[in-house]
Image (spheres, coloured by chain):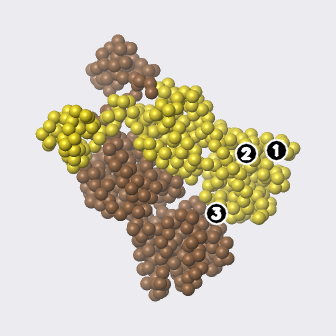
Chain colours: A yellow, B brown
Amino acid sequence: MNKKITIYDLAKTLGVSAGTVSRSLNNHPSISDKTKARVVAKANEMGYKTNKFAANLSKQQTNTIGVIVPKLNSNFMSTILAGIEKTVNEAGYNLIISQSLESMEKEKLNAKTLYNSGVDALLVSLAYDTSNYDHFTPFIHHKIPLLFLDRVHNLPNSSTFIIDNRLAGYEATEHLIQQGCKNLLYIGGNLKRNVYSERLEGFKEALTKHQLPLNNNPVLESDLSSGDVDSVVQHIRTLEHSVDGLFVANDNFAAHLIKALITAGYKIPEDIKIVGFNNDPISELVTPSLSTIAYPGYEMGVLAGQSVISQLNGSINFQSANSITLRHKLIKRESTYKS
Amino acid sequence: MNKKITIYDLAKTLGVSAGTVSRSLNNHPSISDKTKARVVAKANEMGYKTNKFAANLSKQQTNTIGVIVPKLNSNFMSTILAGIEKTVNEAGYNLIISQSLESMEKEKLNAKTLYNSGVDALLVSLAYDTSNYDHFTPFIHHKIPLLFLDRVHNLPNSSTFIIDNRLAGYEATEHLIQQGCKNLLYIGGNLKRNVYSERLEGFKEALTKHQLPLNNNPVLESDLSSGDVDSVVQHIRTLEHSVDGLFVANDNFAAHLIKALITAGYKIPEDIKIVGFNNDPISELVTPSLSTIAYPGYEMGVLAGQSVISQLNGSINFQSANSITLRHKLIKRESTYKS
């Protein structure tokens, strides 16, 4: 790589001292406007880079914010990221984004790399199988703002950004019951993750409130990948009591399931009614269109971005960091009732 | 923020010199294994951070790679990013990701910020309206590897990663013709962007080869946002010769269009046959399922990641950087013929 231009190169070319160059670039009052203009013009001409990293090292800031998400190629996650990026970018911060690929080991490695990179803050949505949280301790210990989004874990001095997953699960399930479903099944991801376990709680609460029996197996854990669709359909076919209502913990899996159930001879919504989660674009486009819970992912990203900037500016004390709950909304479409 | 631990803090705590700490952490042969172990243990205990940025400043490297994409929340883009991230992360690089939000002005700003941040390389997919490329000159001038993906522009000493958009457009159109379409319309994005103009070229070539007349208006430019669907349907309804074949430059827009055309009373594929582009998950899930061009986005991300790492390692001479064309594939589904 080409050698980068330093203030010494500029000084030599301009025939002034390095100190003069440095003070000119920092707009120091001791330097005349004429000299400043000359230095800045030459700096631009020669492609001098403000050495932000070096400058920030002295004030212990890199102006970068680290992010760890399970995977980038998920509509839901990329929507949250879009909101975060826009917000922190406008505030002059860069986003270093990494994927855990749903693995705790990779999440640990990413956390370590980002810590060593000197990020000013860390935003995390937890991997599928994370069961130990020690890799976040250095951030907490060194008072580096730590925020969890969607898939969260409560650690001291960290913030969480969530929706009320329990209530959302309750509302989705109650909607199915109100549409006449009596034998319900919840299909969720790893119950270690708050989002899936809390939706299950809401599901059970709705059954109890409406005096419906919990089946023997009212819950099916799945990795929610399209590869798991066939085995879920198989499970549904072999249940003793025919299922007539499904609450599925994400839209993408629900959309694949609709397609597979129709192929297997089921009528949707006549035989089985389905509610998904997230309000991904797919939910509107699949036939029948999918009832779902609207999850304000972009807004969550924006709010988390604003919160982290406020913590870094000192306008929020990060030790009073707390839990922000955004509003979800049930959206009724064709998969739960004929219009 | 808390003061970070320095080698001087470690030296003081351990009762040794800062030089001993530094050499121990760098595994220098002059230090005994026992001392090294003691220093490393204390460094971990006190949360000492390898000051990677500082270390890299001296070798003029930050181990970060900048990325500018039009938007994060696009299935296609986030798939490419997933491939890039995985590859460069395994090679020890961090990815700084920014969005141009389809605006040249924001793209310029991002390029400047990333340049000033000292990224070791830049990967770009161009914004919708970029018409001037001067913001990339500093990278070329300072021999910082510059790679364009999908939406590319040929600049000296920069690499491009593309598919053969002309051929893909030709094949999509020829498939429509072979299925009996005679009045075809191409719906693309901004024709300034290679991806849309080249697909149009292929579209026209197929019509010419099959001796079909180019209608007066065989092409419709759209921003391909869901908000533009209704006006496109309106346009189709008012055309003098009824359109019977549509080639649409992305799957998401094509899927919305299928839904809107069905609502407007058209039968798909009987009245109008449709081919999309990208093979997004939506193309399989919409009814009728959408014929499309499979675009290997994840592979493109991996290859671009490998290429940039090779350039940074010096195993590829970046001045011989060239154009990599990946294989696309026509996928035939229900939107162009009944099975």
Residue situated furthest left in the rendering: A15
Q: CA distance from mark 1 to mark 3?
A: 30 Å
Between B54 and A186, the one lying in front of the other is B54
Q: Dot 1, crowdedness within 10 Å: few (<14), some or many (≥20)?
A: some
Which residue occupies 53% across, 50% down? A78
Three-letter amino acid code of the residue under disc 1:
Leu
In which chain is the residue bearing label 3? A
Q: Is residue B141 above or below residue B230?
A: above
Between A98 and A259, the one lying in front of the other is A98
Q: Which residue is mark 2?
A: A169
- Image quarter in which the N terminus of chain B is found: top left
Q: Are marks 1 and 3 on the same chain?
A: yes
Q: CA distance from mark 3 to mark 2?
A: 23 Å
Which residue occupies 46% across, 39% down? A66
- Image quarter in which the C terminus of chain B is found: bottom right
In which chain is the residue bearing label 1? A
Judge from the rendering whether residue B237 lies leftward or rightward of residue B80; answer left or right.
right
Mark toward the start of the polypeptide (1 vs 3): 1
Question: Is label 3 in a helix, a strand or a loop?
Answer: helix
Residue B151 visible at all: no
Which residue occupies 30% across, 23% down? B23
In which chain is the residue bearing label 2? A
Question: Is label 1 in a helix, a strand or a loop?
Answer: helix
Q: Where does residue B217 sit, x and y in percent of width and height? A: 48, 81
Between B1 and B315, the one lying in front of the other is B1
Three-letter amino acid code of the residue under disc 3:
Leu
Judge from the rendering whether residue A263 lies leftward or rightward of residue B92; answer left or right.
right
Q: Where does residue A167 sit, x and y in percent of width and height? A: 73, 42
Q: Which residue is mark 1?
A: A207
Q: Which residue is mark 3?
A: A285
